Image (tube, rainbow, N blue to C red):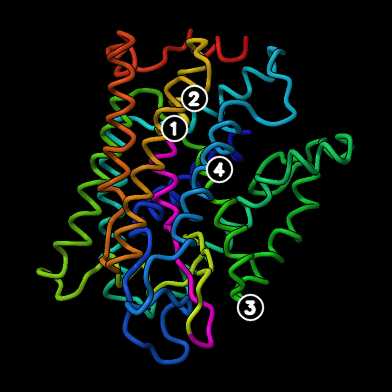
Amino acid sequence: MGNRRACQALFVCVLIAATLLLSAEAGPPTRPKQAAGEGSPVRTASKKHGLDPANFVVVVIAALTLMYGATRALRPPFVDMGTTANQEAYEELAEAGEMQLHTTFMFVIVASGSLVLIFFFMSAMSVLITILFCFISSVALGNLVYPYVDRLTNNKYAREVDVPWLGEMPLLALMMAPFCFACALAWVITKSWLLNNALAFSLIIFFLTSVRLSSLKVASSLLCLAFCYDIFWVFLSSSIFGKNVMVTVATGLNVPIKILVPLIYQHGKHTQFTLIGLGDIVLPGLLLCFAMRLDDAKRIEPRGGYFAICLVGYCIGLTICEYVVGTYHWAQPAMIYLVPGTLIPFAYFAHTRGELGDAWEGLTSSTHQRLSD
């Protein structure tokens, strides 16, 4: 168990740094033409394009992903949380992935350093990063489908076996590993946008279920730092480095860290896409997961609680961002819309209920236990 938890913590740390590192704008502006084999083959809308319905499909996909991710983070599927053993095991894993105030600063610093490193050594590091992400995304894919496969097989392969260097793992996870790695390999070979989205969705759910925020204080720190991070690297980095570092890295790496949606109105021979970076779903998503847990702990109706108001604010913020990107083709860090769009409604709702102080300090251990009552 200890070895497996250490491996999971390693994957989570890599994901957090990489997601912050590549939380680029919801749809990058037109980029210069690249030689074959260089950079990302994903083609986005040119300045000839106007606003496309696909820009708003992105908002729907992001909202549905957050609804599923928050629900799954609250309670694992097909697990009886009424039993003490399952409840304790879940809480142990959840607490291992709980983010603290100081770690929010550490991850932004690490992400910034990584961003600069990749910017200067793009060609040398692109292969390494592709391999790393393929490995992590295949693990995330296995984590996503495991409960459903386990259910379909009536828990026949749920027994744990000892694996060298990894410790005890369910037999079913080992049986699924070749399929998951094959999916990642198929993406490397074909660069299919459907496989890209499957792996990206897996990464989002893996992140939301592995990392947990338990207070508005930590959430505010993380999102405000991400807000400043995006503004600096998108708007100010060109004056220091000569190029827009965020856009250069985000468009130069072809890894499954973005959700791709084909434009409804295509122009030219090649399929063109609009996209949203995983960081623009995951980082606000951590606040939404906390909001759903708070609703559950306080017995608030889901349709009128913290989660609902934050999700509405998220959708409004992302819709504005997509409108600006789709209409004007400006490099827009989505965080400048998503951070106020989620934090302000959350704080206002907590204030109106007289719970702002409680939410700021967060859920206590006793409150955690109520989640499974």
Q: CA distance from mark 3 to mark 2?
A: 39 Å
Q: Is residue 372 visible?
A: yes
Between the residue at mark 4 and the residue at mark 1, the CA separation in whole angstroms equals: 12 Å
The magenta span reads 268-286
Which amino acid, mark 4? Answer: Leu
**Callout 1 amino acid:** Leu
Image: 313 above or below 292: below
- Please name whichever residue, 38 or 41, is drawn nearer the observer in this view of the structure: 41
Foreground residue among 337 and 114: 337
The span from disc 1 to disc 2 (Cα, nearest Å) is: 6 Å
Residue of label 4: 64
Q: Amino acid at mark 3?
A: Ile
Dot 4 or dot 2: first in sequence order is: 4
Q: CA distance from mark 4 to mark 2?
A: 14 Å
Badge 1 vs badge 2, beta-carbon distance below 8 Å: yes
Q: Earlier in the sequence, mark 3 or mark 2?
A: 3
Q: Position of residue 102 (x, y in %)?
A: 27, 33
Query: Which residue is found at the position 31% from the left and 28% from the top?
Result: 345
Instruction: Point out the image quarter for the C terminus.
Output: top right
Look at mark 1 in the image and give the residue it sits on.
Answer: 288
Label 1 environment density (alpha carbons within 10 Å; few <14, some 14–19, many ≥20): many
Q: Residue 270 magenta-drawn?
A: yes
- Could you say where residue 78 lies in the image, as x and y percent from the top left? 75, 29
Q: Residue at x 51, y 59 (%)?
A: 259
> Seen in the image, is 98 located left or right of residue 336?
right
**Count of marks, rendered view:** 4
Q: Is residue 34 left or right of 352 when viewed as pictured?
A: right
Query: In this orientation, does residue 125 appear?
Result: no
Residue 205 position in % (x across, y down): 56, 44
Asked where in the image residue 253 lies, by quadrant, the reply is bottom left
User: Dot 2 lies on which element?
Assistant: helix
